[in-house]
């Protein structure tokens, strides 16, 4: 392996470790939870995320079809990947800071929950997921393997399923208000046409 892609791999690992540490520390001080998803619903998010993360970190040298490269290691792919990773993390952190004490790692409704519509939430309804999907995609670009591509798809799908459960909670917590918000702002892709899901 060329020295440059190896250094980029190390940088990617450091960025993810730094993001994880921030995410854990920033969880302190969140508002009390008054409603949360079931354990079964929670596992439907956690299990795919674990599987996807394991695939994302799958090394090409591990062999098998998962280790097959979609493109050769290069400085260009590594640079694009790290840039996307950093941009995605920055967007997710911006959203996390803007959400403040309303944040939760689970699908919940907090005591005194607020419907945030400013900052990154003016561009997408779920900016943390938007940022993390971009970060995961950037990681996959730098890795360049079948495993990384498959892991990205699994992680993105798990976020889409989770946001749908969140939107059920939000429509019930903010009747009418959330529907109007979702009619103006897209779920994940900034500047795309909003797509409202049918009420449940």
Image (tube, rainbow, N blue to C red):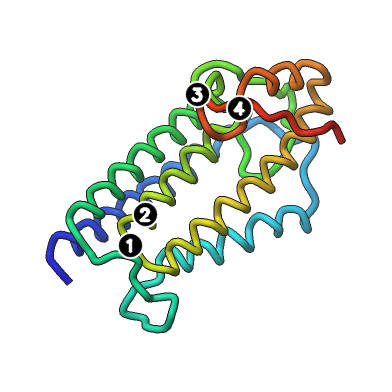
Which residue bears the numbered disc 1?
A: 143
On-image quarter of the N terminus: bottom left
**In the visual, does 200 lie left or right of 102?**
right
Which residue bears the numbered disc 4?
A: 186
Q: How far across and how far down the image is residue 7, in percent?
A: 18, 59
- The Cα–Cα distance between marks 4 and 3, rounded to whole angstroms, is 12 Å
- As drawn, the label of residue 120 is 3
* Contact check, label 1 and label 2, Cβ < 8 Å: yes
Which corner quadrant of the image does residue 22 belong to? Answer: top left
Identify whether 112 is placed above or below 62. above
Q: How far across and how far down the image is residue 40, in percent?
A: 78, 58
- The Cα–Cα distance between marks 1 and 2, rounded to whole angstroms, is 6 Å
* Contact check, label 4 and label 1, Cβ < 8 Å: no
Q: Earlier in the sequence, mark 3 or mark 1?
A: 3
Which residue bears the numbered disc 2?
A: 139
| Total residue callouts | 4
Q: Earlier in the sequence, mark 4 or mark 2?
A: 2
Q: How far across and how far down the image is residue 115, in percent?
A: 67, 20
- Badge 1 crowding class, 10 Å Cα cut-off, few under 14, some 14 to 19, many 20 or more, is many
Query: From the viewer's perspective, is the residue at label 4 or at label 3 nearer?
Result: 4
Specify the farthest residue to the right. Answer: 200
């Amino acid at each position: 392996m060329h020295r440059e892609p190896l250094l980029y791999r190390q940088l990617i690992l450091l960025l993810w470790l730094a993001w994880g540490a921030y995410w854990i520390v920033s969880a302190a001080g969140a508002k009390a939870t008054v409603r949360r998803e079931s354990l079964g619903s929670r596992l439907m998010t956690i299990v795919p995320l674990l599987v996807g993360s394991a695939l994302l970190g799958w090394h090409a040298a591990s062999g098998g079809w998962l280790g097959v490269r979609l493109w050769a290691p290069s400085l260009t792919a590594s640079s694009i990947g790290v840039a996307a990773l950093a941009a995605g993390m920055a967007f997710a952190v911006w959203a996390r800071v803007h959400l403040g004490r309303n944040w939760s790692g689970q699908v919940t409704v907090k005591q005194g929950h607020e419907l945030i519509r400013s900052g990154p939430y003016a561009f997408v309804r779920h900016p943390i997921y938007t940022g993390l999907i971009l970060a995961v995609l950037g990681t996959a670009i730098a890795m360049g393997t079948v495993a990384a591509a498959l892991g990205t798809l699994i992680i993105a799908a798990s976020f889409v399923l989770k946001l749908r459960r969140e939107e059920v909670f939000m429509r019930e917590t903010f009747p009418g208000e959330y529907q109007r918000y979702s009619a103006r702002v897209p779920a994940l892709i900034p500047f795309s046409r909003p797509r409202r899901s049918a009420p449940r």
